[in-house]
Amino acid sequence: MVSQPLHALTLPPGPRLFAALRDALSGDGPAVLPLPAGRAATAVITALRPTHADGVRQARGEAVPSGVAVVIATSGSTGTPKGVMLSATALRASAAASLRRLGAASGERWLCCLPPSHVSGLQVLVRALLSESEPIIHDGFDPDAVLTSGAHHVSLVPTQLHRLVARKADLSVFRTILLGGAAARPALLEEARDLGARVVTTYGMSETSGGSVYDGRPLDNVDLKIGADGRVRVSGPVLFSGYRSGPSPFENGWFVTSDLGELRDGRLRVLGRADDVINTGGEKVVAAVVAAVLAAHPEVADVAVIGRPDPEWGEAVVAVVVPADATRPLTLEQVRAYCKDRLPAHAAPRELRLLPRLPLLPNGKTDLAGLRTGT
């Protein structure tokens, strides 16, 4: 099998990283592994074994198959990071389908304020390449800088959008706000649109070259189906080439995700992760469904739902809530009553934890593993 070098890069977001990505997509340079900031970079290098790290050859490095342009390290929140190998063809197919769906014109500028070590940030740069425009790249998220960037389009996670909404900012300055990384509260979307935002919600992951479903509908040439196990399956040219190590979860050409979902009139509704199902008293509770119900409560600013081992119930449903008003927090009795009016009784939380904010991973998703362990 023909192979090529894999260069791990700790370059800060900016022109040099953009140039390395451009060369990798065109075949004029090696495949790249954008590294996260800080000590996490060392763990990624150890796990994914690039041939070079910042130009220095690694003694135990391994090449990648020809055609792979980028390797994205998964968060590794539940174990050793996996390397998602993405071809130039898959990345370009995703970016081109995104631009078509959004009606984005050539020359319109994209703002990257997400880490390029995550596929959401990386794809902003690929869209800029296909748009033949120079991306606007920020090293981190600063609301003032974002609002005055002059960009036409931006990708955000819900926490970032919340910070813009809290400022009552004029969000019509962007032609599009792509919102992904985690489920957004309906109230947040409504508030943002009241401020002039054109918000497009996305669903996807590193294995699908980023968002492959916009506002519930798959991008061109992307197909969806729900398996007998309730998991979402994806097929199409946006799929990854495989993992750096370990088996790839393909089933007759379909990528089997870890998400539970349902399709209604061709529109996808994601119910939650299969590994976030809580078994309580012999009943199964999808944590994300309970969280979505509680997120609609006017006195809830943010919420996550997890399972806790319990000697009587097997697992107890736990609601972790950020109150909208810290001086008037909800009680467990109020939370249970609200859920019982909208869900089966067994889905009502048996424990309530109040926090000033939910812990987040670098990609903007809630750190559920941290909540379970109390870290």
Image (tube, grey):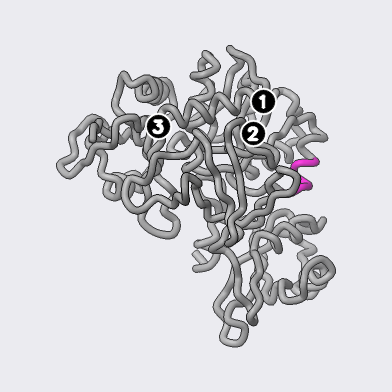
Which badge, 3 or 2, comes first in the chain's sequence? 3
Question: Badge 1: how crowded within 10 Å, few (<14), some, or many (20+)?
Answer: some
Region rendered in magenta: 185-190
| Snapshot quadrant of residue 197 | top right
Q: Position of residue 146 (x, y in %)?
A: 62, 28
Q: Is residue 158 above or below residue 76?
A: above
Do labels 1 and 2 touch, CB within 8 Å? yes
Mark yes or no: residue 298 visible: yes
Look at label 1 and name its amino acid. Answer: Leu
Disc 2 on helix, strand or loop?
strand
Q: For the residues carrying marks 3 and 1, which lies nearer the camera in this image?
A: 3
Q: Amino acid at mark 3?
A: Ser
Q: Secondary structure at mark 3?
A: strand
Q: Using the numbered discs, state the Cα–Cα distance from disc 1 to disc 2 in whole angstroms.
A: 10 Å
Along the viewing direction, whichever of 301 and 9 lies nearer the viewer: 9
Badge 1 marks a residue whose secondary structure is helix
Rendering coords of residue 171 (x, y %): 73, 29
**Left or right, 219 with reference to 240:** right
Q: Residues within 10 Å of mark 2 (few under 14, many from 20)?
A: many
Q: Is residue 354 left or right of residue 362?
A: right
Say which residue label 2 marks.
Answer: 178
Position of residue 73 in the picture relative to residue 112 (left or right): left
Q: Which residue is mark 1?
A: 102
Prevailing SS of the magenta stretch: helix
